[in-house]
Image: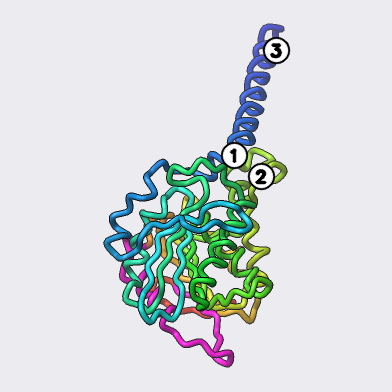
Amino acid sequence: MVCLSTVIAVQIIAGILVGLYLISFVVLVVFQRRFLFLRNQDDFWNAPDLTTLGLKPENSQTGQRSHLPLRWYLEHKPGAKKWFVVFHGNRFAAYTRSWIVDAVHSMPYHFVVVEYPGYSKDPTSPSMKLFKEYALDVLDALKVQENLPFVLFGESLGTGIVNFLGSEATSKNFQIDRVILNAPYDSITRVARSKFWMFPVGWVVRDSFPAAEWAKKIKCPILILHGTQDETVPFRNGENLLSAYPKSTYVEHVEFQGCKHKDMRIFFPKEYFSAVHMFLEKTFAKDIFRPERKIIGKLQARG
């Protein structure tokens, strides 16, 4: 026979656990944007690695949709054929993304590394809605400067923004030539579900970034680079995104076996940057579109 004190103890423990669960869920809901947008407090104007490459900080234009100064690092190259535009991940500042510019700097592009609202000492509160408006403003402004095709590079959080821009290419009259995605996801909601499976996060995520929905409208060639052991954006979320693209869209998917979120270019720099260069240099024709999947140099057909 269970004594009364044991029953009371069990009830107290259960009450404490339920209370901790509810408190944790409330904290997650209230502070979700702080967890998603890990804003840095670095000085936007201090970017020695980018300025060494020729990219200079600018914030002289205001976006028509976001009504915010458009902050970026930009280099105009004589004789450039395209814009190469970088949207970075949520943990970083734009000035730290010199490595991707350096890797393709010999190509005939104008280079732009975009800084987000709310980052690098900007007091603006970030959100998906604001990021979408801001990204459209960026392409509009660059198009006015010189109407050239865009090559879009997205990293982590930035891959969702790039997918959004790709989905808007036709309606906004952007000529997006090709897209490169480093560690992409299908949606922030699905990533959150995989990490916080014990909470009903699907009901409360405010900034879902539904990349898989946007992907359905993208027609330009796409390169996906993803580590199979990614602890930040699970590999399966990237595969879900892969399956969302139209069947007629050319997609190269390079899997880096055993790599985590930041490992690919560190442990396999030759393979990583070779994949980027080959993709950018490739000539695409409608009659030779053949989706491909690469696993550290081993080539397999998608599907």
Magenta stretch? 265-294
Instruction: Tell me, yes or no, whether the two marked residues, 2 and 1, touch with CB atoms within 8 Å.
Output: yes
Q: Quadrant of residue 136?
A: bottom right
Q: Where is residue 301 in the image (x, y as percent from the top left)?
A: 53, 80
Q: Is residue 229 visible?
A: no
> Residue 205's mark?
2
**Residue that numbered label 1 is attached to:** 32
Q: Mark 3 points at which residue?
A: 7
**How far apart, in angstroms, are the residues tagged by discs 3 and 2?**
38 Å
**Which comes sooner in the sequence, label 3 or label 2?**
3
Residue 224 % position (x, y):
49, 69
Cα–Cα gap, marks 1 and 3: 37 Å
Reply yes or no: does residue 275 show up in magenta: yes
Task: State the residue in front, 87 or 30.
Answer: 87
Task: Find numbered disc 3 in the image and state the secondary structure of the residue it sits on.
Answer: helix
Q: Where residue 200 sits in the image (x, y, percent)?
A: 69, 40
Residue at x-position 53% and y-position 61%? 159
Q: What residue type is labelled 2?
A: Val
